[in-house]
């Protein structure tokens, strides 16, 4: 009676396509071994003294993308648009009413602001800025048609 493949029920934490992809690649971020295996302490200011914070704890597969993108932003003087840093690696659901995990739970997202005061931020990045991020396979929530989140950058679009 069961349709092949349709009877598998995913835990609600991973029911989104982006969550499923990260879960499949890297496992459950709530597992004790996850952090040691996948989270890297990146001293961003070593290479980019203009970066608003010294260090990020971030996924091992995400920081090299940002590293390459920041180098190119510098080349075109677009790094000046980055004025503040928010959330990076932190385990939480997308909102209080949903069990779906945020990309931040895997260290696969970084929030950045065009205003140092995040509350005032209506982050509008220039098209050139977004283009460079996308060239390096970094997705920006500014492009989302519904509930755009311009501060949100991630290695998976979600
Ligand atoms: Zn975010």
Image (tube, grey):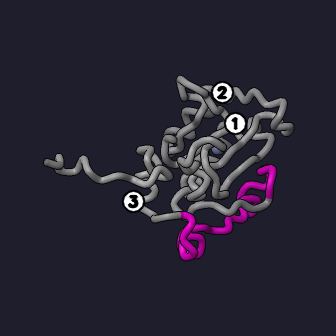
In reply to whether residue 52 is colored magenta, the answer given is yes
In reply to whether residue 49 is colored magenta, the answer given is yes
Task: Report the residue at 56% width, 54% height from top.
Answer: 108
Ligand 1 sits in quadrant: top right
Residues rendered magenta in the picture: 29-53
Instruction: Tell me the residue that label 2 is attached to.
Output: 126
Cα distance, mark 1 to mark 2?
9 Å
Q: Quadrant of residue 55?
A: bottom right
| Element type where label 2 sits in the image | loop
Task: Report the residue at 80% width, 40% height from top.
Answer: 83
Q: What percent of the width, then of the height, locates residue 124?
A: 70, 26
Is 40 rendered above or below residue 66?
below
Instruction: Tell me the residue that label 1 is attached to.
Output: 78
Instruction: Tell me the residue that label 3 is attached to.
Output: 24
Is 36 rendered above or below residue 135?
below
> Mark number for residue 156?
none
């Amino acid at each position: 009676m069961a349709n092949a493949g349709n009877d598998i029920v995913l835990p609600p934490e991973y029911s989104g396509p982006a969550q499923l992809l990260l879960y499949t690649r890297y496992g459950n971020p709530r597992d004790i071994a996850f952090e040691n295996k996948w989270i890297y302490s990146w001293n961003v200011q070593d290479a980019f003294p203009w970066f608003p914070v010294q260090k990020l704890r971030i996924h091992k597969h995400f920081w090299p993308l940002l590293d390459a993108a920041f180098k190119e932003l510098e080349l075109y003087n677009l790094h000046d648009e980055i004025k503040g840093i928010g959330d990076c690696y932190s385990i939480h659901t997308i909102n209080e009413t949903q069990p779906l995990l945020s990309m931040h739970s895997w260290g696969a997202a970084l929030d950045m602001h065009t205003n140092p005061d995040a509350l005032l931020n209506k982050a509008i990045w220039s098209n050139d800025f977004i283009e460079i991020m996308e060239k390096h396979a970094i997705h920006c929530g500014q492009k989302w048609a519904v509930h755009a989140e311009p501060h949100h950058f991630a290695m998976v679009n979600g």
